[in-house]
Amino acid sequence: MARETILPAGDLCGRLRVAVPLSFGPTHFAPVLAQMAQRHPQLHIHAAYSDRFVDLIAEGFDCAIRVGYLQDSNLVARRVGPIYGKLVASPDYVKTHGSPETLEELVAHQALMQGTEGWQFMDGDKIITVYPRGRFKADNALALAAAALTGLGIAWLPDGVTHEYIASGALVPVMTRHPPPPAGVYVIRPPGQHPARKVRVLTEMLIECFEQTPDPAGVGL
């Protein structure tokens, strides 16, 4: 790996290898990475776009951008902005199976998920985690949206994916009495006392992006 140095002008050089989610990555995070490359012409940026879980240490990444609720790990995380989402289903699914109103009812429904993750909901001031079940799984938000449109089940999806479908009536919100708490966008890096300056610069640029446009998708990331 190229050693990071700082040029006299404060520019970065060397290589930044970053894992970026395929959902939102090309549209929301790629412009920030391009701007970073423009500001630092001596820096080589290698971005890998995938929704699979990347092992940063084993695969040699400097950092990753992750979206959602963080799982416990030994990695260091810095939150750079919020992400808003809701549970949705197709009108046909609701007509056939009904719309769950309580957390207990939700467990009986078909959930469209990335894996075995828990879904978080607000119950008054408390956050409750529910572990739904379902037979359709995908590691990409657009694929889960396609399954929801077909009537296969209920999906937790970011507002940036669902707003057009909800506006057209192709999807409808469910579980509105128990909204999910805002998730987050995080920069994740391997453990260490001090982050590399290139990781710190990327983190600061993403924070700046969210501060300037708190809703980068125009409707909730």
Image (cartoon, rainbow, N blue to C red):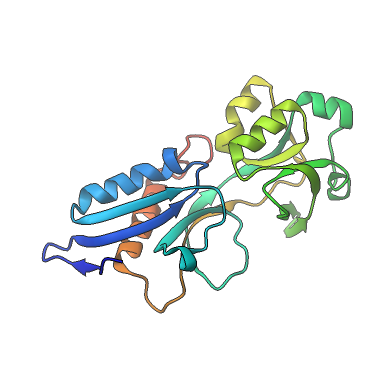
Query: In screen coordinates, is 9 left or right of 83?
Result: left
Establish if 125 lies above or below 196: above
Question: Where does residue 210 sit, x and y in percent of width and height?
Answer: 42, 48
User: What residue appears at the point 18 percent right and 52 percent down from the top-left corner?
Assistant: 41
Query: In screen coordinates, is 75 left or right of 198?
Result: right
User: What residue appears at the point 12 percent right and 62 percent down from the top-left corner?
Assistant: 9
Question: Where does residue 112 sit, x and y in percent of width and height?
Answer: 73, 41
- Looking at the rendering, which quadrant does residue 207 occupy? bottom left
The number of callouts visible is: 0
Residue farthest top in this picture: 168
Residue sitting nearer the eye, 125 or 218: 218
Establish if 49 lies above or below 198: above
Query: In screen coordinates, is 221 left or right of 46?
Result: right
User: What residue appears at the point 51 percent right and 54 percent down from the top-left corner?
Assistant: 66
Q: Is residue 77 visible?
A: no
User: What residue appears at the point 46 percent right and 74 percent down from the top-left corner?
Assistant: 191
Residue sitting nearer the eye, 190 or 100: 190
Establish if 160 lies above or below 43: above
